[in-house]
């Protein structure tokens, strides 16, 4: 969640621009920026991180999705 917030700030995105990229409303971006974590479940956070092309350590998150696909089973 903190990486999403930093991604918005580092890229100097307005909340509206970040919302367009992430596919959520500006008010949801506002929740992210203000650290209101309880408003997001893990699936949503992973989806947003993938849309922002963020990394978790040395692993890019979109690789997880491609490896497991929608079924949740490794291919």
Image (tube, helix red, strand yellow):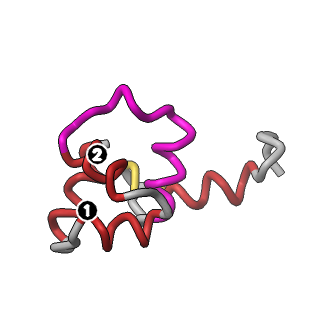
**For the N terminus, which image quadrant?**
top left
Q: Main secondary structure of the magenta part?
A: helix
* Residue on which disc 2 sits: 32
Disc on res. 53? none
Which residue is nearer to you in this view: 40 or 69?
Answer: 40
Residue numbers of the magenta segment? 34-51
CA neighbours of label 1 inside 10 A, class few (<14), some (14 to 19), many (20+):
some
Which residue is nearer to you in this view: 30 or 45?
Answer: 30
**Magenta stretch: residue 12 in it?**
no
Label 1: which secondary element = helix
Label 2: which secondary element = helix
Q: Position of residue 12 (x, y in %)?
A: 16, 73
Q: Position of residue 17 (x, y in %)?
A: 31, 73
Quarter location, residue 43: top right
- Left or right side of 22 for 36: left
Q: Position of residue 50 (x, y in %)?
A: 50, 59
Label 1 close to label 2 by CB (< 8 Å): no
Q: Residue at x 44, y 35 (%)?
A: 40
**In the figure, 64 relative to 35: above or below?**
below
| Residue at mark 1 to residue at mark 2: CA–CA distance | 11 Å
Q: Residue at x 30, y 68 (%)?
A: 16
Q: Please state the total of marks drawn on the protein image.
A: 2
From where the camera sits, is residue 74 visible?
yes
First in sequence, mark 1 or 2: give its number. 1
Q: Residue at x 51, y 55 (%)?
A: 61
Q: Position of residue 65 (x, y in %)?
A: 66, 54
**Magenta stretch: residue 49 in it?**
yes
* Residue on which disc 1 sits: 7
Quarter location, residue 15: bottom left
């Amino acid at each position: 969640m903190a990486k999403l917030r930093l991604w918005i700030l580092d890229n100097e995105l307005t909340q509206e621009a970040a919302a367009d990229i992430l596919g959520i409303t500006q008010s949801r971006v506002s929740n992210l920026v203000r650290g209101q974590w309880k408003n997001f479940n893990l699936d949503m956070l992973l989806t947003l991180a993938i849309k922002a092309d963020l990394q978790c350590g040395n692993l890019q998150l979109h690789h997880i999705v491609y490896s497991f696909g929608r079924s949740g089973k490794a291919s």
